[in-house]
Structures are given as structure tokens and as C-alpha cells.
Image (tube, grey):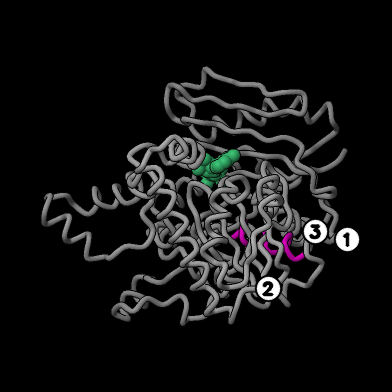
Amino acid sequence: MSSAVLVLNCGSSSVKFALYDPESQERLLNGLAERVGTPNASITIKYASGPRTIEDLAGTDHKGVLATVLDELGDWMTENGVTISSVGHRLVHGAEEFAESALITEETLDAVRRCSPLAPLHNPANIAGVEAAQAVLPDVPHVGVFDTAFHQTMPQVAYRYAVPTEWYADLGVRRYGFHGTSHLYVSGAAADMLGKPLEDLKMVTAHLGNGSSLAAIRDGVSVDTSMGLTPLEGLVMGTRSGDLDPGILAYIAGRTGADVDSITNDLNKRSGLLGLSELSNDMRELEAAAADGHEQAALALEVFTYRLAKYIAALAVPLGGIDVLVFTGGIGENSHGTRAKVLDHLAFLGFELDPEANDRTIRGQGGPITRSERPVALVVPTDEELVIARDAHRLAATANPDQTNPDKEVSA
Ligand code: ADP
């Protein structure tokens, strides 16, 4: 029998899951449950032999979905001699309570609940996922891995907003940052790719997906990031505005009568690339439309890359210069057009694009895309689930030394 780590990412209506071999760090399978809690719920499991989709899940909640997934995986695990030795949960907001991953106990869950007002959509769904998974797998250690934890090393000068101090002291209003597992993973992988110690590199990592954020990494830790109290701050994203004048809220409320919830919804769901283009939030579609002469799509791409480049350059301040720029996420890994535009804006910092390397570095490939070696720009495919699996395995060993192999160093 070999052991596997189950990685779970529970949203309000979806559950992403994956099984990892903790020794080889290979992903054994993965899948997605969608529209959980609705009549159209479905589960797709991607086995090496091909995908399998399960429907007829009407009335099933997170717990029911997880029970169905584990039931489905049961045969595969028996056939392959695999048992689940730990579960790693992606948890969105750990506020100042969590600077690292944590074994899930009742106290841990209480602390995650205390963070919920900061992420009212995400944390309750995450907690429901943990409770459902604990009910289905009560005998293995469960570990929480937080999106915010990696950025807890930011100094006060980076995380404080210039607002009344009691907002911070009483209500936790500060910058937290997100996408921590991705920034952590790609910074380590980039240093490995370059054959240099991470601690010696002044690095900006750009996670560019539907949500996008930057991290400034110095001495191997996050010293600044572009997202804030919520994932709305910073870069232009698929449907989120990123930075704007907070005075806009009162202006729109005054002019239209809209309330805070509806304006916040517009800033999260109807803004960004979608708002500018009035066409799509999807980079592929926008690139195709812009190439066909769609002016608003072209403008959306210009605003996206301009803001991105401006923000990358700003992070040279906390770093004292930039040695390495890493592109990751669906856009960072695939959109050579975005990368070329950003590096063109940043040529004054010494980045010199290698157009051929840039054009061929797509679909899960990594490597340098500049002729310049310092600063160098790299593409590094991210693997957030692997970070969760590694942490789950490492912390599970401290909870249950008999079931796992503490001799093997798998720490992130
Ligand atoms: P999420 O943040 O939801 O995990 P992803 O990291 O998968 O999202 O990124 C999604 C984005 O990546 C979309 O805007 C999509 O258009 C873009 N993308 C994916 N493949 C390509 C491609 N080949 N060229 C340009 N953009 C791409």
C-alpha cells in the first residue's frame, strides 16, 4: 500500500480535488465538482485512462459530493494499492491568525471562522468543505493552507493603509495579499531554474489568471504584493477593476442610487477586461478580437499591460531593483502577447525580450524569455495544489508519525 494526499479546494458551488503521491510528488488524478447544491451538479474525475463524469447529484451538498467522489475513487485506490494519508485544504483568508499552514483542529477552525468577515464568500465555503471532508475521512489529519499566509512577512510599511488607525486595530483593515501558494511555488521553482539561491534574488512574481496579483520577494520572503484587504485591489483582472479612486463609490451611489453591495458587485464582476472591452473577460478571446480590429478589446489589453508594467516597476522600490520577473497563471504562462507588451514597457529597467523564446514558451512550458540575464524574465508554470499536498504531508507527519514518512524531506 502506498499513501496519497488528497487536496481539496472547496468554493461555494464547486469542489476541486486532486490526489498526490507525497514521495514522488506526482499528481495521480484530479477532478472538479461543479454547480454543487443545484439540480445540475456534476463531478468530473480525470483518471490517467480518461475522464469520467457523474451526474444525477440533485440535492447533494458538499458532504454528499465528497462522499460520492471518495466512493468513485475507492475502486481506483484499491486497484492501485493507494490509501489517503492526509487531506490538504485550500483556505482563502487566514488574516493575521495564520502565517503558515496549520493542522486543522477545533481551535484552527474557530480561528478561520474569526477571519470570515474578511472573506465572507470564501471562508464559510472553505469551512463547509473542511467539515464535510472530516465527516467522510475522520481518521486522517487535515491541514489548512492559506492564500494569505505567504504574505504575512510583509513589513508594516507595505501592509498598512493610511486610514484611521482604529480601522486597522479594531477591524483588521490592512493589506493581506492572496495567491500565496502560487507566489511561493513559482519563486522557488524560478530560483531552481536559474540555479541560484532564492535568498540572493530580488524577484517579482506575476500570477496572471482570472484573478491577478504580483508579489515582491526579497531574501526569499514576500515583502509586498498588489492585492489588499480583498482580492479586488491592484492589477486589472478578468472582471475586477483593481486599483481605483475610492471616491468613485460615493460618486456612483450619488448619481445612480446604487447601494454599496451593488457597486461592489460591479467592481468584482462587471469591470476589468470585461468592463473595458464589453466583450469578454477571457484573454484568448480578447486577443483574437483585437487582432480582428475590435477597438475596445485592444484598449482592454493596453490598459491591462500598462497597469501591470507600472505595478511591476513600483515593486522595484521594496526590492531595491529587480533581478528576476516571473510570469505564471493562465495568462502569464500562455499569452506571449501580454508578456511582450509588459517587457516592452519595462525595457528601461534593462529587460530585453527574446521574441523567439517568448513565442514558443506556452502550454505548461517554462524558461527564460529575455536575452538579458539580469534582469531576466522567466515563465514558470504554477502548481498550487502541489504546495498544498507538500504542506499537508509535512504537517500530517507531525500529527501522526506512524502513517507518514517523516524521514523524507518534502517541505515547501
Ligand atoms: P484562474 O484564475 O481561474 O485559475 P487561469 O489561471 O486558468 O484562471 O487563467 C485564465 C486566463 O488565462 C483566461 O483569461 C484565459 O484566456 C487565459 N489563457 C489561457 N490560455 C491562454 C492562451 N493560450 N493565450 C492567452 N491567454 C490564455
Q: Which amino acid does label 1 sit on?
A: Asp
**Quarter of image, res 393:** bottom right
- Chief SS of the magenta region: helix
Distance from the alpha carbon under mark 1 to that under mark 3: 9 Å
- Say which mark, if any, is on residue 220: 2
Where is residue 231? Give x, y as percent. Answer: 43, 57
Q: What element carries label 2?
A: loop
Distance from the alpha carbon under mark 2 to that under mark 1: 25 Å
User: Which region shows up in magenta?
Assistant: 180-191
> Is 159 drawn above or below residue 77 in the view shown?
below
Residue most extreme to the top: 56
Q: What element carries label 3?
A: loop
Q: Residue at x 73, y 77 (%)?
A: 200
> Is 390 drawn above or below residue 72 in the view shown?
below
Q: Which of marks 2 and 1 is nearer the N terminus?
A: 2
- Say which mark, if any, is on residue 410: 3
- Say which mark, if any, is on residue 407: 1
